[in-house]
Image (spheres, rainbow, N blue to C red):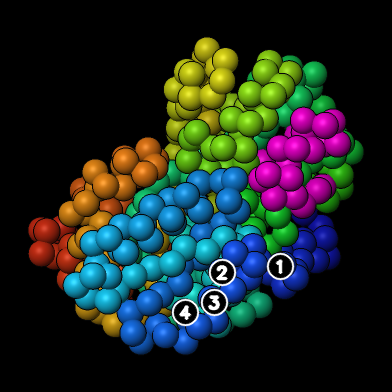
Amino acid sequence: MMKDDTGRKHWQMLRYGTVVLLFCVVFPGMIGYARERDSGRYLMATANTAGTYYPVGVALATLTKVKLEPEHSLSLNAISSAGSAENLELLRDDSVQFAILQGLYGYWAWNGIGPFRLAEPRRDVRSITMLWHNVEHFVVKSDYLVNGTMDDLEGLKRKRFSLGARDSGSAGSGYYLLQELGFVPEDDFELQYLDYGASTEAIRSGEIEAMNIPGGPPVEAVSRAIGALGKDVTVLEFSDEQLERANRKYKLWSRYIIEPYTYPGQDEAVRTIAQPNFLAVRSDVPDVDVYRIVKAMYANLEFLHAIHPITRAMKIEAAINGLPVPLHPGAARFYREQGVDIPDELIAR
């Protein structure tokens, strides 16, 4: 089990770590956007540009600009961030109004547990829709392979291991999974906190031996690493027993198969696991705006598919499956119109 003081320091670091956001440079007008939220111009936090959150966020934002802005003056602007942990803070501060979140972080925040146990439950957050599965990619140097599963991390004791950027969902969920598999991350590894792009460069140059890169396949950072190193790196598999251990506290992860040739030279399937990602929104965003956005999303899935293939996972019949927080009333209205049966736990009170 994790030592109390080590765990507390880690979660405080994840939650309160200072992060310089890329969007402060790329989108210098972001403060203006936030102030104009009443005019229908909203900000949506995603994650690192080398992952999947950001390009999917750009796809969603592009859809609103094409389909909603001309008639309704309603649009989203996707910005890069550190990921789920920081996105929840940005939502709290009204720095953004929409965000893509890991299911695990939504569950933690809504219930005031995990890294949010020292704060009030986050009842200011609502869900809109499930998006796609956040697939675990624990990438290691092949020199450490024994059976090709997460057990092989035993051979990386005291080796350099990047969990993801500080204050990111990747680092938080990766740390959690390692704990559930019996590791004491701070003691067992020389942890590095690098974003996806920096992790890829570090494993290519030999500065680290392993990296944690969850995302929707194909993840750009994983493609770059395998493209450069070939068989010298491997995506570890999760055994059935390891999947059960991941779900010991929260039943969020499911079996996921990365099909052959998803990545360069990958000629065999990889049996890993995945948790859901979902689109979240502040509870005070007007119902009509949320209704129009979710309606436009599901009326234009082919538009999204043409921008990013992972959006093919979006289906109306699975839109509310596994949501960790209640629906925004605007989204609930749309699903009722589509004949979707909404369980009581997803009705906002």
Hey, what amino acid is under mark 2?
Phe
Q: Secondary structure at mark 2?
A: loop
Give how far across and how far down residue 66 sits, in percent.
Answer: 27, 60
Which residue shows up at 38% across the image and 61% down it?
A: 61
**Which comes before the other along the chain, label 1 or label 3?**
1
Q: Residues within 10 Å of mark 2 (few under 14, many from 20)?
A: some
Foreground: 305 or 106? 305
Which residue shows up at 66% across the image and 77% down it?
A: 118
Can residue 123 be seen at all in this image of the molecule? no
Magenta stretch, residue numbers: 191-212
Q: Are marks 3 and 4 in contact (CB under 8 Å)?
A: yes
**In this rendering, would 113 be left or right of 124?**
right
Per the rendering, the mark at residue 27 is 2
> How far apart are labels 4 and 2 at the CA level?
10 Å
Which residue shows up at 36% across the image and 44% down it?
A: 307
Per the rendering, the mark at residue 29 is 3
> How far apart are labels 1 and 3 at the CA level?
16 Å
Q: Are marks 3 and 2 in contact (CB under 8 Å)?
A: yes
> How far apart are labels 1 and 2 at the CA level?
13 Å
Q: Are marks 1 and 3 in contact (CB under 8 Å)?
A: no
Q: Are marks 4 and 2 in contact (CB under 8 Å)?
A: yes
In the picture of the structure, the residue carrying the numbered disc 4 is 33
In the picture of the structure, the residue carrying the numbered disc 1 is 20
The answer to whether residue 300 is above or below residue 218 is below
Q: Residues within 10 Å of mark 3 (few under 14, many from 20)?
A: few
Which residue shows up at 80% across the image and 66% down it?
A: 9
